[in-house]
Image (cartoon, rainbow, N blue to C red):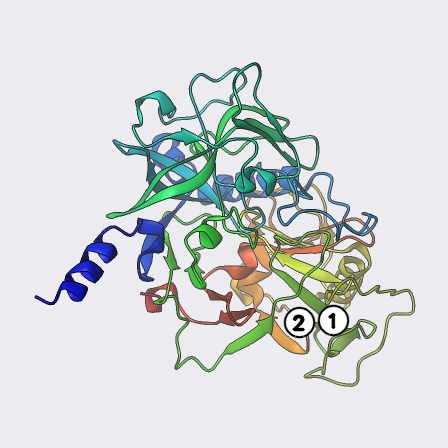
């Protein structure tokens, strides 16, 4: 064998896993309540109620609009406007040598990968055993002088001779996770990646993932997220309904591709808000309800072209361009069940739905939702008229049918809107209920998100 070829083969064999040629990885997304449902025999109604409750808690403290621009801040902003509570879909991973199997909530609205570690002084209750870094031969704490440590806004050196990177990752509502930033081997299925940075958390306060999760896997746009560290240029998922016991799918890598033959698909450019660079942020510039279209004021991007009669601008709407993102932006959040619209947009949606649906409004929803309509006696939910609703992102319209807008509240005899009201001027959030039974593809190289109205079985 040629000596040069032999040296090349030896060099390739010595490459760390994180530098290996790009591959694709498939993970099952289990509903956070799947195991609890089997144990407690929870009804679909109770499963949905729990998911809604977590979404409202997760929203706590959202207030993007009044935040000071943070262009001078580091790539990973330590504060996010949602709490880690929530985490509706779980993945199983391994960390360390030998690999410790753990379950984590996936989150498209944050970056840090973290799991609770022994010894823990202030951890929340988790179902899985806690990771002990002392038994992993590949675990190494990162020094506080490292570039990786510097990616976090809030970090410090350890006490005395300990030069390890001690971090504090803060969510809104004073929720934090604290611990040591370290590297270890991460196992996804049969594949291992050495030197993956993660938070070895020894304290979590002010809000936490559900006990079924040992931590969080951030899929955001910052350098510490899973997709960034593995150099994943595209990923896709398909989510079952939140009350379903059927798992969803997550595909990381080159094979992540939405159904090519699907006719009902839209590709939306991702935008950036320098205050919150980790988010998958879309410019929301139009709202369609029935034959009424609300067009938001022009920004630095294209305005919406309505698939209905001429739009009527809102007299009270004001939008301020931030980077290439407009003030009426919407972030994609897989860990929130319901969608939240900025207050003026929500009020417009509610007013128009009342005009269109023409059913009496109800109160006291057992699901904890705000806008509900009393179902007529003897009329099934699936036979009640609901107008067409669509959201415009840079002029591309994402249509939401009744199954992605309303849920039946059987205990109260009502149907309720799976959309909540965010603060005036705040960012909107696209929750997973509106993404159910839909393929969502993130192309990080091209900077776009594609929504495909195609069943989860088509995502392989």
Q: Which residue is mark 1?
A: 285
The quadrant where residue 377 appears = bottom right
Q: Viewer-proximal residue, 298 or 347?
A: 298
Whole-Å distance between the Cαs marked 1 and 2? 6 Å
- The answer to whether residue 132 is seen in the rendering is no
Image point (68%, 60%), residue name: 330
Residue at the left extreme? 1
Residue 407 in percent (x, y) is at: 56, 54
Element at label 1: strand
Image quadrant assignment for residue 168 = top right
> Which of the marked residues, 1 or 2, is nearer the chain's N terminus?
1
Work out which quarter of the rendered image holds the N terminus and state it. bottom left
Q: Residues within 10 Å of mark 1 (few under 14, many from 20)?
A: many
Q: Is the Cβ of the residue at disc 1 closer than 8 Å to that at disc 2?
A: yes
Q: Which residue is mark 2?
A: 393
Relative placement, left or right, of 392 versus 452 is right
Identify whether 57 is placed above or below 219. Answer: above
* SS at circle 2: strand
Can residue 224 be seen at all in this image of the molecule?
yes
């Amino acid at each position: 064998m040629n000596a040069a070829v032999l040296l090349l083969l030896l060099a390739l064999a010595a490459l760390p896993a994180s530098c290996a040629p790009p591959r694709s990885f498939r993970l099952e997304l289990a509903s956070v309540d799947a195991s609890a449902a089997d144990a407690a025999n929870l009804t679909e109604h109770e499963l949905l109620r729990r998911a809604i409750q977590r979404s409202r808690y997760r929203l706590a403290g959202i207030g993007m609009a009044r935040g000071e621009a943070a262009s001078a801040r580091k790539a990973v902003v330590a504060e996010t406007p949602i709490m880690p509570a929530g985490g509706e879909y779980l993945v199983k991973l391994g960390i360390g040598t030998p690999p410790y199997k753990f379950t984590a909530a996936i989150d498209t609205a944050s970056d840090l990968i973290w799991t609770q570690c022994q010894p823990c002084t202030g951890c929340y209750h988790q179902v899985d055993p806690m990771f002990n870094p002392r038994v992993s031969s590949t675990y190494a704490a990162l020094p506080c002088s490292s570039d990786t440590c510097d990616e976090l806004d809030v970090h410090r050196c350890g006490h005395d001779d300990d030069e390890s990177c001690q971090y504090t990752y803060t969510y809104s509502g004073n929720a934090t996770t604290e611990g040591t930033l370290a590297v270890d081997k991460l196992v996804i299925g049969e594949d291992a990646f050495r030197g993956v940075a993660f938070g070895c958390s020894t304290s979590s306060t002010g809000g936490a993932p559900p006990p079924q999760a040992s931590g969080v896997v951030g899929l955001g746009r910052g350098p510490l997220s899973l997709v960034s560290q593995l150099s994943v240029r595209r990923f896709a998922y398909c989510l079952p309904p939140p009350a379903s016991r059927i798992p969803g799918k997550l595909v990381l890598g080159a094979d992540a591709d939405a159904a090519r033959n699907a006719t009902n698909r839209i590709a939306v450019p991702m935008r950036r808000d320098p205050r919150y660079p980790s988010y998958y942020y879309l410019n929301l510039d139009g709202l369609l309800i029935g034959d009424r279209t609300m067009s938001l004021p022009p920004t630095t991007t294209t305005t919406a072209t309505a698939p209905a009669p001429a739009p009527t601008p809102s007299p009270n709407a004001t939008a301020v361009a931030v980077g290439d993102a407009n003030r009426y932006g919407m972030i994609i959040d897989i860990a929130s069940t319901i969608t939240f619209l900025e207050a003026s947009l929500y009020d417009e949606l509610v007013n128009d739905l009342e005009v269109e649906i023409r059913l009496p409004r109800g109160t006291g929803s057992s699901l904890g939702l705000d806008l509900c309509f009393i179902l007529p006696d003897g009329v099934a939910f699936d036979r009640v008229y609901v107008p067409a609703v669509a959201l415009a992102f840079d002029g591309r319209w994402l249509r939401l049918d009744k199954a992605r807008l309303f849920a039946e509240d059987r205990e109260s005899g009502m149907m309720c809107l799976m959309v909540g009201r965010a603060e005036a001027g705040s960012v909107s959030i696209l929750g997973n209920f509106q993404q159910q039974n839909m393929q969502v593809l993130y192309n990080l190289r091209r900077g776009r998100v594609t929504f495909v109205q195609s069943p989860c079985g088509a995502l392989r």
